[in-house]
Image (cartoon, rainbow, N blue to C red):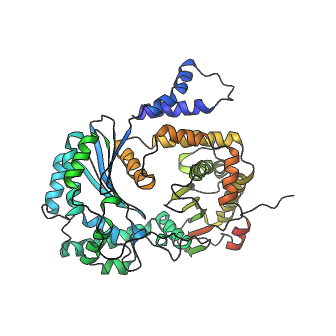
Amino acid sequence: MATRLLRISSALRTYSNKTSHVKISKQWRSTAASLQQTLINQPATKTTTFENGMRVASEDSGAATATVGLWIDAGSRYEDDKNNGVAHFMEHMAFKGTAKRSQTDLELEIENMGAHLNAYTSREQTVFYAKCLSQDVPKAIEILSDIIQNSKLGESEIERERGVILREMQEVETNLQEVVFDHLHSVAYQGTPLGRTILGPTENIKSITRNDLVTYVKNHYKASRCVLAGAGGVDHAQLVDLAKKHFSGLDNKIEGEIPLIHHCRYTGSEVRVRDDSIPLAHIAIAVEGAGWTDADNIPLMVANTLMGAWDRNQGGGANNASNLAKASAEMGLCHSYQSFNTCYKDTGLWGVYFVCDPMQCELMLYNIQNEWMRLCTIVTEREVERARNILKTNMLLQLDGTTAICEDIGRQMLCYNRRIPLHELEKRIDSVTAKNIHDIGMKYIYDRCPVVAAVGPVENLPDYTRIRQSMYWLRV
């Protein structure tokens, strides 16, 4: 699989390099010509929707292993101030035993299958998935249905897990990248559900009760908000039968208030946590981006690729694709940086996170904003062509393995109610021009109020007013 993707990667670069003066061998010309056929001939994603609204989606590649999981349209965004953290708490409790399996029985059963059971919670989704041999798919789905629908939620297990989550929160606080992004959300979406952390505040973790967990599951783990996804050695018809058999207990009845999703207001603002005992400054700057289904999302992804990423431990210098990466390498602006395009249903954050020496904050920020202005005004077709190739290559390489594909299927089914075929994504990326980048730059970046989060020795970081003034160019 990896070899095939690498060949596609090389083909992508060749395919778009129509103005190159380098002679391309006949072998690579034929590979480039067959790129579209390669993408079109990827295994189809089959989908089935039940009367209760639950969806089943799968891609059968005939592999010896498979990943199956339940993607639920529920995360910290659906919580309030009182129960913030309950979605993540429930994710932990799902593995602590059910009505028919103790925690020990569950762990032994998974171990004996040679499988892996995991889960995660984001701001908009909760996911439970299993990786196993293809012949063990029925057993894996039965286990998933059991832990999701029949979790015991014993009081002693809740108390024990409370301590585990509090220790996890302490670990997260030492990961400064996580800390910065939590701060970034807290100011960008202040006063809205997206501004809260996924783990929740300490006082909530200490006070969440069994009733809070049961109420959350009853109101959010509903059939119409669930997608059963599978990838690898999975048969779609079998998956549909298994879903009917094991998830028939899921309904759409809601006790109490109907959970609604409200638009999360973006506010240009900043937060600084100065701590000179930390050796390096950790800073993120962003503007409001587009939601998953917005037509501007693909051009924003290309613009994000134009900004690129760099790490001094990985080397690279004058030949870096990104101008910001070149400057970082040649001038020693930072230790590392990465651009990001974080999407939600109706909004997003588009920006750059970087780690630098204490007295380099201002210079690094100047170069970032200067590059943003270039995106809005003078970025060239050649730069956009290269970014398109990098984006397509990264997109394909990220789909290496059944778990990555299953994740892609589940997420896209929740976000778009379909999985976008690779050849369609390729066409949409190829349609992005330099003018499109200028247009979305002017719409989302130029003269917009940014949001800034900074932690560490950030005395050298310019005042917010100066940062705001650098969001446009005045040139004669």
- Front residue of 453 and 301: 301
Quarter of the image with the N terminus is top left
As rendered, which of 420 and 379 lies closer to the eye? 420
Residue at x-position 52% and y-position 58%: 342
Q: Which residue lies furthest to the front in this view?
A: 51
The quarter in which the C terminus is drawn is bottom right
Task: Tell me residue 364's x, y (percent).
Answer: 66, 60
Q: Is residue 454 left or right of residue 212?
A: right
On the rendered structure, is 429 left or right of 41?
right
Q: Residue furthest top?
A: 26
Which residue appears at 60% of the width and 68% of the height? 452
Query: How many marks on residues?
Result: 0
- Above or below, 60 against 131 in this view is above
> Quarter of the image holding residue 29?
top right
Q: Nearer the viewer, residue 250 or 15?
A: 250
Percent coordinates x, y for residue 267 in the rendering: 60, 72
**Image x and y of residue 240, in percent:** 26, 46
**Image quarter for residue 430?**
top right
**Image point (51%, 29%), residue name:** 35
What x and y, as percent, mark residue 178? 47, 65
- Identify the residue at image location x=27%, y=62%: 251
Question: Does any portion of residue 201 appear in the rendered image?
Answer: yes
On screen, residue 57 above or below 146: above
Can residue 162 be seen here? The reply is: no
Residue 144 falls in image quadrant = bottom left
Q: Give the vertical position of 30 relative to 448 (above or below).
A: above
